[in-house]
Amino acid sequence: MRGSAAMKILIVEDEVKTGDYLRQGLREAGFVVDLARDGVDGLHLALDGDYHLIVLDVTLPSLDGWGVLQTLRHSGRETPVLFLTARDQVEDRVRGLELGADDYLVKPFAFSEFLARVRTLLRRGRSQEPEVLRSSNLELDLLRRRVIRSGQRIDLTAKEFALLELLLRRQGEVLPRSLIASQVWDMNFDSDTNVIEVAVRRLRAKVDEPFEPKLIRTVRGMGYVLEALPPARG
Ligand code: CA
């Protein structure tokens, strides 16, 4: 099932190009994304799925965004909702916020602004969680999506970031490959754990090998553990 490593977002958008574009952008930013193309499908997914955020277009076939939002809130779901409207009209904004939306964006918008809103809403929803995960001189900043070791910025791919986030969140615990597979790749690997070995090797080469102390350990026959050490400066 869903773990904490990847945040799950539902997009409900009938415009094919916009929906595909937002989905791809969010995936590249490291999120797990589902896309519904009309209001009825969107509502079903929203009620069944375990989403951290819903991006909801207002003008939709079969059931519009207001209907989706209203039904969702009446069912008691508090999932944060960012609604997209094509018109910058006060009534629309007021209506959306009254129905229980958390924020809105007026089309057209820049992807960078969209992503910033998404992150703010996700952060608000998890305000009790730390924004920076640390062990020794390694730190991972969840909000700014960056990793720093001994003061040096390290560039990671979205998967490497998710993997490191998982290891840091559960530091000190031996994580079996199957758990890493399900939480970072959203897949079950029955036998082929090579994907994970390769990813861990690449992650180590970037965040561990050039530095001291070594933090990521292989536990033979079991999995991987990131050592839990007190934060260090420098
Ligand atoms: Ca639309």
Image (spheres, rainbow, N blue to C red):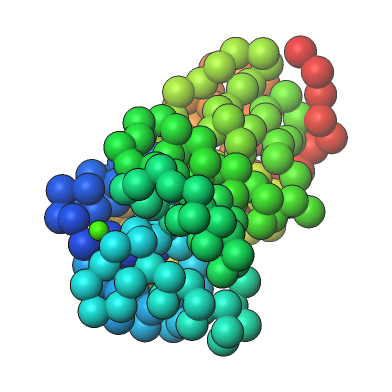
Q: Is residue 20 above or below residue 74?
A: above
Residue 19 position in % (x across, y down): 24, 53
Above or below, 151 relative to 132: above
Q: Judge left or right: residue 155 versus residue 127.
A: left
Q: Quadrant of residue 181?
A: bottom left
Judge by depth and name the residue closer to the eye, 5 or 21: 21
Residue occupying the point 63% across, 21% down: 149
Q: Is residue 4 above or below residue 210?
A: below
Q: Is residue 150 above or below residue 185?
A: above
8 sits left or right of 210 in the view: left
The residue nearer to you, when weighing 94 against 10, is 94
Residue 207, position as x, y percentages in the image: 54, 27
Q: Residue at x 66, y 57 (%)?
A: 125
Could you say which is closer to the camera, residue 185 or residue 27? Answer: 27
Instruction: Quadrant for the C terminus, please.
Output: top right
Number of marks in picture: 0
What percent of the width, then of the height, locates residue 230? 84, 35
* Residue 128 quadrant: bottom right
- The outermost residue toward the left is 16
Residue under the point 55% across and 51% down: 103
Kindly tell me whether residue 221 is visible in this rendering. no
Question: Is 35 or 63 nearer to us in this picture?
Answer: 63
Determine the image quadrant of residue 12. bottom left
In the image, residue 102 lies at what x, y percent?
A: 59, 56
Q: Is residue 56 visible?
A: yes
Residue at x 64% of width, y 47% of height? 123
Judge from the rendering whether residue 6 lies leftward or rightward of residue 15; answer left or right: right
Q: In what quadrant does ligand 1 lie?
A: bottom left
